[in-house]
Amino acid sequence: MVNNYDFDCELLTIGNELLIGRTVNTNSTWISKRITTVGGVVTRCVTILDELTDISQAIGEALARRPRWLILCGGLGPTFDDKTMEGLADALGRPLEVNKEVVRVIDRKYSKMQMRGLISKVEMTPARIKMATLPEGSLPLSNPIGTAPGVLLSLQHTLVFALPGVPSEMKRIFLKWIEPVIQKEIGDVHRTSKTLLVRGVLESTLAPLLDDILSNSDSVYIKSHPKGIENGRSKLEIEIATSFSIASEAEERVTRISDRLSRMIDEIGGKVSVVGDEK
Amino acid sequence: MVNNYDFDCELLTIGNELLIGRTVNTNSTWISKRITTVGGVVTRCVTILDELTDISQAIGEALARRPRWLILCGGLGPTFDDKTMEGLADALGRPLEVNKEVVRVIDRKYSKMQMRGLISKVEMTPARIKMATLPEGSLPLSNPIGTAPGVLLSLQHTLVFALPGVPSEMKRIFLKWIEPVIQKEIGDVHRTSKTLLVRGVLESTLAPLLDDILSNSDSVYIKSHPKGIENGRSKLEIEIATSFSIASEAEERVTRISDRLSRMIDEIGGKVSVVGDEK
């Protein structure tokens, strides 16, 4: 199923550590927040094991949904379980090629490590050549703080990006190479959000009020998050957000909804305060 | 593609908050860790928006892969954006039914809230009936600390569980209703893992050693996690883990590999220490 968003993005995070509960997937949270902030919509995040068939299959499924962007994260390193490039090549039916420019870059990185005494000799071992082996048509994205580069592959419907799983490297490459591309394509979009803390009203009591508000405001995102009971009173947060090309209009939309909702909650005996305000 | 694991589990976490970067998906990490600990394998975690077609489609895709267990998390509440039950019914082609027993349970919960002064009157509004509306054939799983129950649906190849997204409620229902079922089916399995901290060896230097060890030990999981450079020396963690029906044998397997790897790293000038030991 192809969705209706113009600026949709899918994430594919790869790594056994995510599915054995060893590592919390903060990479996907961070990327999602950045994409949302510049006006894109992350429609799906799939997390899979370091298995070639799983990677290839998940990439194929994502591309069939034709997102504008597909971001792969993890599995670019030198060890046996880094299989993202092989999976990508397999999914696209393209051969893997050793990228000579990347080999030179990696060789220079190791030479510097040797000079700093980190390694005794510079050898382009198969494990190191692996990090320079990319699917045909790949554009390497330089990694200023690690060895394996990121990758960009431009397909008919989708730009595919691949990022290392090490958070510091992932962030640097994203901010340098991916966010500017996405931001340019989306253009000027301002996202504004406001979070209300509501006490004394149950989520099920609030539900019809939210229905009513939403039926009259299609461009605004509203979501309630129950936060349990505190001092015998129900507590929940409501996020109201919108994106628009004019910042003042985005803010006005959120404020209008937030004021209206606050009045409605007040009328049924709830207590509202603003806890978060993001522009 | 159906995988080869006997005790495989897929997760489907549902909620816009996860894909706008507002909430870190710690639910999937927690569930993955529990499943891994009792000897199961989480093969995939898919995160989607609160959209009916996305939920229905993702459930259909997961069921086609025939995991032993499929755990849905989120979207069971009373508001307009809680669509998991509708999506599940849609994916299975089953009607939704109001479960009278669940209505009674929810009614009792609201009566207690009224007695505690949380609400002024007990009304089974459409929003509250919604939490008792489940796909035909569902078995409700009692929720001791929240309103919406969990759900179990037994299909031909797969047991489908649905859990609320509020972490405290999710954990209570999982531990009471899901883990015992999974554990009983898997039987007695002991997972042992050991994490080595390695200094002074690059991941790319280590790669061929890991290849060598893995080619001689198919039942052991090994994964290296680069941790950057510290005081001019490369630092990484290596996790070695296995699961086996006899605890002492599982420990012996991990110790054997860990000792062998430590010797190999020692020979190439690296420094090894044990940082984690889980039995």
Image: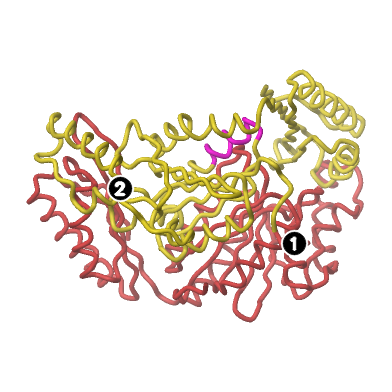
Chain colours: A red, B yellow
On the image, which quarter does residue A264 sit in?
Answer: bottom left
Please, is residue B141 above or below residue B93 in the view? above
Q: Residue at x 81, y 23 (%)?
A: B255
Q: Residue furthest top?
A: B248
Amino acid type shown at disc 1: Gly
- Give the farthest residue toward the bottom: A156
Residue beneath label 2, please? B131
Q: The residue marked by circle 2 belongs to what chain?
A: B
Report the amino acid beneath label 2.
Met
Residue A187 location, quadrant? bottom left
Near mark 1 (Cα within 10 A), the count class, few <14, some 14-19 or many ≥20, is many
Judged left or right of residue B33, residue B72 is: left
Q: Which residues are magenta?
A: B29-39
Indicate the quadrant containing the N terminus of chain B: top left, top right, bottom left or bottom right: bottom right
Q: Helix, strand or loop at disc 1? A: helix
Q: In front: B189, or A272? A: B189
